[in-house]
Image (tube, rainbow, N blue to C red):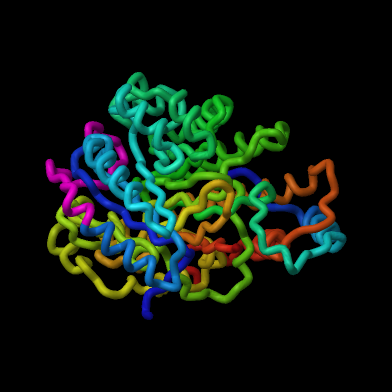
Amino acid sequence: MDKHFIGKKRVVNLIITHQCNLNCVYCYEKFKSEQRMDFETAQKIILKEYALAKNSEWFDSLQIDFFGGEPLIAFDLIRQVTEWVLAQKWEMPCHFFVITNGTLLNPEMKTWFAQYRDAVTLGLSFDGLPEMQNLNRSQSNGLIDLDFFLENYPNQQLKMTVSRETLPHLAEGVLFLQRKGFIVEPSCGTGIDWTPEDCLEYEHQLYLLVQEYLSHPELKPILPLMISFENIQLPPFERPPCGAGNSFETYDVDAVRYPCHMFTPLVQIKSVSEKYANLDEGISCKPDSNCEKCLLINMCDSCRGYSLSQYGCYNRRDTKICDMFQVQCRVAAWFQIHRFLKKSEKIEKCSPAEMRNWRGLIYYQRNLDRVGYGKK
Amino acid sequence: MLDLIVSESVLTQFEEELETICVDEDDSACHCEVFACSCSNACGTDYSRGNCSCSSSCGSDYARNGSCSCSSSCGSDYSRE
């Protein structure tokens, strides 16, 4: 098998509608339309994927994601598909996930999602302070019932995307949501022209959070500050860059399969997306050659689909976000070391992975000159 | 730019403290409280949930309920049983 399967969960992403009711400033779906998936198409895809997962040694569960556009525009399909799958009483566990902007959630939907919350997880995108949400996401703050998400999905992380406009309020926005009780995971928007000034601001904002977390250990740090350095000392390896086309597949409204949604006609021009339609093998793991000497090569993320739309080549590193990632690592390393040294209780035992992370932090600090795109 | 280079004396202190920690080779669990299983996000949607998260839309096998099987997607592969 050529594919680089990772994990044991088969994730099937169904784009059930191309429509969205918002127009977020960083949206990468440039080719929205009124197309939707019908029930029969969804059934066929799920039956095929279930059979694949069940007969494969690689997978022990199936996850079906409802994706858009805004998937709640097609709520009737979500309900129909979910109830149909659950009625099959399949041996292999199936879970459903919906990522939503939360603005269309009406009382009927709330009742249904609350009833099915063990089977269906509803994930919310929300961008920080109400003003940040309004700035990034079409003045939609007043349309979202945050308490519903908090009450029904307390362990579901809230996706917070940072734009250039909201970056100066990043720390404030994170803390606002964390104090409400949310697990917040901020990330810098892909495709934004981040400038050197933005990097400085990002560093400042992360540092504000670091100070808060060091003085309030009861607050759980955001994941960008807890990024693991455990693989930093390994030689560059051709790891699966992402699950795209491997443990993960996306089906567009017309049942055409793509490595992930970033390869679909919602994001790519037709002539490009056609090349990646119904591929039988996963996409290559080979990294950008300009990254081969960078110390962070085993840690950094680069969205393959975004690179494809931007550079015409999915292996090319997204350099726009590279500097921001370097900032993140710099602050994260400083934070993790100081947090460790500040711990009131002595750590007596750890896992090998934890130790690799801590040693990786030291290695990183002593080799900072080896970080960057195009390093020779 | 902030001075975020950790001084050699602090690094040495850190190293010395690590020497006193016992590594449990049988412990393959992911200790999310110590450092998270994270697949930091490169692309759009964040599917994270539970303690471990793979924020990433592109193809994550993202963990939930702290079961820590974030075999990601874009970014580090933190999968461990």
Say which of A317 and A149 sits in front: A149
| Left or right of A98, for residue A266 | left
Answer yes or no: is residue A360 visible.
Answer: no
| Residue A193 belongs to the span the image colors magenta | no
Which SS type dominates the magenta stretch?
loop
Q: Position of residue A220 (x, y in %)?
A: 63, 38
Answer yes or no: is residue B1 visible.
Answer: yes
| Left or right of A87, for residue A195 | right
Rendered residue at 67%/47% (across/down): B33
Q: Position of residue A237 (x, y in %)?
A: 51, 75
**Furthest residue to the bottom?**
A1
The quarter of the displayed image where residue A319 is located: bottom left
Rendered residue at 28%/42% (across/down): A27
Say which of A110 and A186 sits in front: A110
Position of B49 relative to A369 (above/below): above
Q: Which residues are magenta?
A: A20-43
Say which of B60 and A272 sits in front: B60
